[in-house]
Amino acid sequence: MKVVCHDRYREVYSSDPASAPGRIESILEELHGRFEFVEPKPASEEDVLLVHNKSHIDSVKAYPLIYEIALLAAGGSIRTAEIAMQSEPVFGLIRPPGHHASRGSSWGFCYFNNVAVAVEKLRQESNIKRAIIVDVDLHYGDGTANIFASSSNVAYFHPDGPNRQVYLDELSSFLSAKHETFDILAVSAGFDRHEQDWGGMLKTEDYYDIGRIVKEFAENSCEGKRFAVLEGGYNHSVLGKNVKALLDGMT
Ligand SMILES: [Zn+2]
């Protein structure tokens, strides 16, 4: 399994918790030596225009450091999705996150919708049609849902069960009710629902189960094509272990 990461994701580009110093390092510590690392290139403005309008891009551009890192995050997500197209599971260890970025606005530490840019680029350039996006972040990915609201070829799901078992059951039920095939499965991988993070619920082993559930679905319905990219997750003392658990499940 490959991990897409860039040194510049360590840069503190803002004062929000997604940009906190040491966050990427806490994950790298856990993954180092266990995965093959791939360095991405920044997305182009044309790539970002696939899902955002020009005025939103210009509003991010007003903050040059954020703009640079946000383009690099979108590029990281694109690279991650391209590797997944070779039926190899892959994780985009990127920041800033993206799932609260809609076509013309963003909030919640997000600027460009990394997963949406990658899925739309594949749909435009890699001859794929149908994608399924599972968002396991604590927060609903309103940006991703908005961007694909009118597209019947991109499914978005955010489980929200009140406890661990119901949560995992919701995810399994949603996927097993999908009888059609998809070209690729993407995971918006937030870890802020962990018991020691903001959501106070999931255990580390649950991320392994999530990985296993999406892997099984991808093998049955997407020719194995699956990828995940980092969204939220703010407790550096457990974040790396949770990422590792998800990746072990997805492998
Ligand atoms: Zn979140």
Image (tube, rainbow, N blue to C red):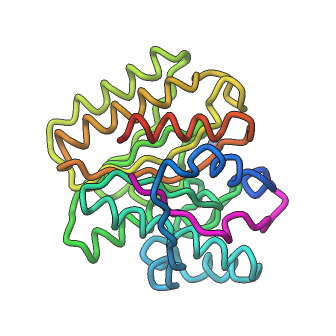
Q: How many marks?
A: 0
Q: What is the x, y in percent for residue 162?
A: 55, 17
For the point 48% across and 57% down, the residue is 3
Compared across the picture, whether 32 is left or right of 179 comes to right
| 20 vs 241, nearest the viewer | 241
For the point 54% across and 79% down, the residue is 42
Q: For the C terminus, which image quadrant?
A: top left
Image quadrant of residue 240?
top right
Decide whether residue 7 is among the magenta residues.
yes
The extreme front residue here reads 33
Q: What is the x, y in percent for residue 39?
A: 51, 71
The extreme right residue here reads 15
Image quadrant of residue 80?
bottom left
Compared across the picture, whether 176 is left or right of 105 comes to left
Image quadrant of residue 220?
top left
Which span is picked out in magenta? 1-16
| 10 vs 52, nearest the viewer | 10
Q: Is residue 90 above or below residue 70?
A: above
Q: What is the x, y in percent for residue 92?
A: 50, 58
Ligand 1 found in image quarter: top right
| 104 vs 125, nearest the viewer | 125
Decide whether residue 66 is among the magenta residues.
no
Q: Is residue 59 above or below residue 31?
A: below
For the point 63% across and 28% down, the residue is 194
Q: What is the x, y in percent for residue 109?
A: 70, 56
Compared across the picture, whether 149 is left or right of 175 comes to right
For the point 50% across and 34% down, the residue is 245
